Image (cartoon, grey):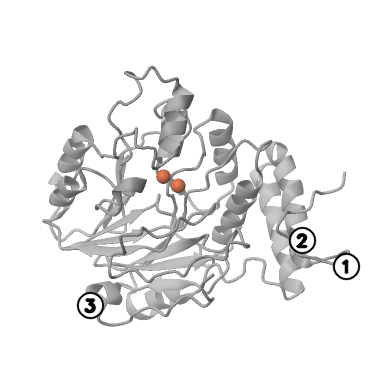
């Protein structure tokens, strides 16, 4: 059986580039995914990466640098790293395999990290329309991540069956854990007020409504009272000096309401976090480089593996290192994955591993100085 060409692969007079061959191999892998065990997957992935390296073509490009790891070794012996992959928006494989290939690429990236991260955070929106086939496909691919994976849910995973399938695959959507002296909390920040019952919507109509961010029908996201009470109790036993990192799919501050880059009760959640010396919130949903600080809380967005959203027209938080408009002819531009180095005080160096550009690091020193020093360099490609 001949492999189908990746739609973005370069073509030069009938000669297949290494990248084309790489994508073809990945397409084969994708087709066989259901029957591959973990060991076979890793073997195929390693072979593809090895072939690329041998030809001098960087298939992984500059997705991950050792910048964060170097920081850790030099400054803080106790620092550790975790990687993230987010917002893959998988469709059924019969409809779209581009986003599947992007998620496979991110899995390759994190599996190639040396040393390996302590864990990988998946930032939500694994599926596009919450369908069982989409979520099963995502779960199957994520099984091949070598490091432990911590899951977070996004609105695209949730609103078809209100999280039933996602929870069956991945467990509770709200939980906390401790790792190397840091307390981690994972929230479900995409609850909405019931706009569907009164309108007599089917589950798919509800899902499609939420998937369209600016339809004017749905309510804004919220963490909700029940989870805020859970959070208050969860944090209750901690000293205020405890390093705290919160994962939420939507930003826990008010960014841009018309697109639902917004969590209504973010100020109330912030209140629960304000007694801690410093807090880091890592969020998905916005699909862009985005950095903010409110008092003691440092916010960092995650890149999507599927597509970048444009920036909100109202303007950006001032600590954001603005990514120029991505190249509309390169579907990978503005996409990527990333890595977070956690220092003993809980502050982080946040690496945006852009697939088509140099990696961008927003350091803890930049955040501590409120932008006054260690300002990251601008992205390395022109605006389009
Ligand atoms: Fe998303
Ligand atoms: Fe989202």
Residue at 38% of width from left, 81% of height from top? 74
Callout 3 touching callout 1 (CB < 8 Å): no
Q: CA distance from mark 2 to mark 1?
A: 13 Å
Crowding at dot 3, Cα within 10 Å, few <14 / some 14-19 / many 20+, comes out as few
Picture quarter containing residue 229?
top left
Q: Is the CB of mark 2 within 8 Å of ligand 1?
A: no
Quadrant where the image shows the C terminus:
bottom right
Q: Tag 1's secondary structure? A: loop
Q: CA distance from mark 3 to mark 2?
A: 44 Å
Q: Earlier in the sequence, mark 3 or mark 1?
A: 1
Please, is residue 245 above or below residue 371 in the view?
above
The label nearer to you, 3 versus 1, is 1
Residue for badge 3 = 369
Q: Tag 3's secondary structure? A: loop
Crowding at dot 1, Cα within 10 Å, few <14 / some 14-19 / many 20+, comes out as few
Q: At which x and y percent is residue 70?
A: 43, 77
Residue for badge 1 = 13
- Left or right: where does residue 228 sit relative to residue 220? left
Which of the two residues, 193 or 274, is positioned nearer the viewer here?
193
The label nearer to you, 2 versus 1, is 1
Q: Tag 2's secondary structure? A: helix
Q: At which x and y percent is residue 336?
A: 52, 60
Please, is residue 378 above or below residue 305 in the view?
below
* Res. 20 mark: 2
Residue at 52% of width from left, 65% of height from top? 326
Picture quarter containing residue 171?
top left
Residue at 20% of width from left, 42% of height from top? 231
Is residue 166 visible in the rendered structure shown here?
no
Q: At which x and y percent is residue 379?
A: 47, 75
């Amino acid at each position: 059986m001949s492999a189908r060409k990746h739609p973005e692969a370069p073509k030069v007079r009938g000669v297949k580039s290494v990248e084309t061959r790489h994508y073809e191999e990945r397409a084969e892998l994708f087709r066989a995914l259901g029957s591959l065990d973990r060991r076979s997957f890793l073997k195929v992935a390693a072979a593809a990466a090895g072939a690329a390296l041998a030809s001098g073509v960087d298939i992984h490009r500059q997705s991950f640098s050792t910048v964060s790891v170097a920081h850790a070794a030099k400054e803080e012996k106790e620092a550790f790293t975790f990687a993230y992959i987010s917002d893959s928006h998988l469709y059924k494989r019969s409809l779209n395999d581009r986003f599947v290939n992007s998620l496979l690429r991110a899995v390759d990236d994190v599996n190639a990290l040396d040393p390996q991260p302590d864990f990988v955070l998946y930032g939500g929106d694994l599926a596009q329309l919450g369908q069982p086939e989409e979520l099963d496909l995502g779960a199957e691919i994520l099984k091949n991540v070598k490091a432990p994976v911590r899951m977070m849910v996004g609105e695209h995973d949730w609103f078809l069956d209100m999280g039933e399938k996602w929870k069956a695959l991945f467990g509770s959507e709200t939980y906390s854990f401790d790792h190397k002296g840091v307390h981690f909390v994972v929230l479900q920040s995409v609850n909405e007020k019931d706009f569907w019952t009164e309108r007599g919507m089917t589950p798919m109509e509800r899902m499609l409504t939420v998937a369209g961010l600016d339809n004017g029908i749905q309510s804004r996201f919220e963490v909700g009272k029940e989870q805020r009470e859970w959070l208050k109790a969860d944090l209750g036993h901690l000293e205020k000096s405890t390093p705290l990192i919160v994962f939420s799919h939507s930003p826990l501050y008010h960014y841009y309401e018309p697109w639902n880059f917004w969590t209504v009760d973010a100020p109330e959640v912030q209140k629960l976090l304000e007694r801690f010396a410093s807090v880091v919130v890592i969020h998905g949903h916005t699909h862009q480089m985005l950095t903010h600080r409110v008092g003691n809380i440092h916010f960092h967005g995650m890149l999507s593996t599927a597509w970048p959203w444009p920036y909100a027209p109202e303007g950006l938080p001032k600590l954001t290192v603005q990514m120029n408009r991505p190249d509309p002819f390169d579907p990978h531009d503005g996409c990527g994955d990333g890595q977070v180095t956690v220092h003993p005080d809980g502050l982080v160096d946040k690496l945006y591993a852009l697939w088509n550009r140099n990696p961008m690091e927003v350091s803890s020193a930049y955040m501590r100085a409120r932008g006054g020093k260690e300002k990251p360099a601008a992205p390395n490609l022109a605006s389009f």
